């Protein structure tokens, strides 16, 4: 792990380490730095050898502040992503973390106002939802982005669904 991480990334790393070592969530920083006082949806992504190892987040804020959102989502990314086994403490030195702070979702009528580098996509149909962050290495086209969101949400292309876009501020 790089020694010069953004404070939100450092917080994500410390929260996973603390949870693995102590068995409970890292306490929220006190005093809380000003840049962590806002509320926003946050995704924490964990990679190992450049490959995804865990990613969990919130579209809308669930917690009192950005610090708490990062702490909780980092722990969930490490332990609750159903695609991967839980992170083990000996892996920590091999992992890289990124934190995406989301803007609020904006409803769009169709995919013409999307850009895979700039916008993430949310597809909603009844009680199903698929989400994909923007600027992902293996997503090159809007069609790919839409197909992945539909698949992740268990939504058929023929189902009635709504589209939402959002932007992120990504910290590595």
Image: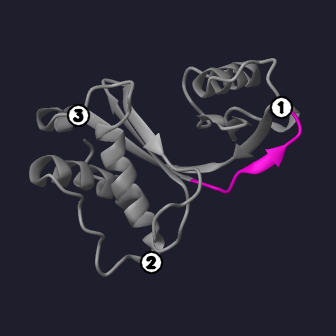
| Residue 6 visible here | no
Is 171 or 157 nearer to us in this picture? 157
Residue 109 in the image, given as x and y percentages of width and height: 89, 39
Residue 25 in the image, given as x and y percentages of width and height: 24, 58
* Quadrant position of residue 165: top right
Taking 3 as reference, is 169 left or right? Answer: right
Taking 37 as reference, is 166 left or right? Answer: right
Q: Which residue is mark 2?
A: 34
Question: If you read the primary sequence from the N terminus, does the residue marked by circle 1 or circle 3 appear first?
Answer: 3
- The residue drawn where x is 16% and y is 34% is 88
Question: If you read the primary sequence from the N terminus, does the residue marked by circle 2 or circle 1 appear first?
Answer: 2
Residue 152 in the image, given as x and y percentages of width and height: 58, 25
At label 3, counting other C-alpha atoms closer than 10 Å, the crowd grade (few under 14, some 14-19, many 20 or more) is many
Residue 160 in the image, given as x and y percentages of width and height: 82, 29
Q: Which residue is mark 3?
A: 87
* Quadrant position of residue 44: top left
* Magenta highlight on residue 22: no
Residues under labels 1 and 3: Cα distance? 36 Å
| Quadrant, the N terminus | top left
Q: How is the image coloured?
A: one colour
Q: Which residue is mark 1?
A: 111
**Labelled pair 2, 3 in contact (Cβ < 8 Å):** no
Residues under labels 2 and 3: Cα distance? 30 Å
- The residue drawn where x is 13% and y is 38% is 89
**Which structural element holds mark 1?**
helix
* Quadrant position of residue 131: top right
- The magenta-colored residue range is 102-110
């Amino acid at each position: 792990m790089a020694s010069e991480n953004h404070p939100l990334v450092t917080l994500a790393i410390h929260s996973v380490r603390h949870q693995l070592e102590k068995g409970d969530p890292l306490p929220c920083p006190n005093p809380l730095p000003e840049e962590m006082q806002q509320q926003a949806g946050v995704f924490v992504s964990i990679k190992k050898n450049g490959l995804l190892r865990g990613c969990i987040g919130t579209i809308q804020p669930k917690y009192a502040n950005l610090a708490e959102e990062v702490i909780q989502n980092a722990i969930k990314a490490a332990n609750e992503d159903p695609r991967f086994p839980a992170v083990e403490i000996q892996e920590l030195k091999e992992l890289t973390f990124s934190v995406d702070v989301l803007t609020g979702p904006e409803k769009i009528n169709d995919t013409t106002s999307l850009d895979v580098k700039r916008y993430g996509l949310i597809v909603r149909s009844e009680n199903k939802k698929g989400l994909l962050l923007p600027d992902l290495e293996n997503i090159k086209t809007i069609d790919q982005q839409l197909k992945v969101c539909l698949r992740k949400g268990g939504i058929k292309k023929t189902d009635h669904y709504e589209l939402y876009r959002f932007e992120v501020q990504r910290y590595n």
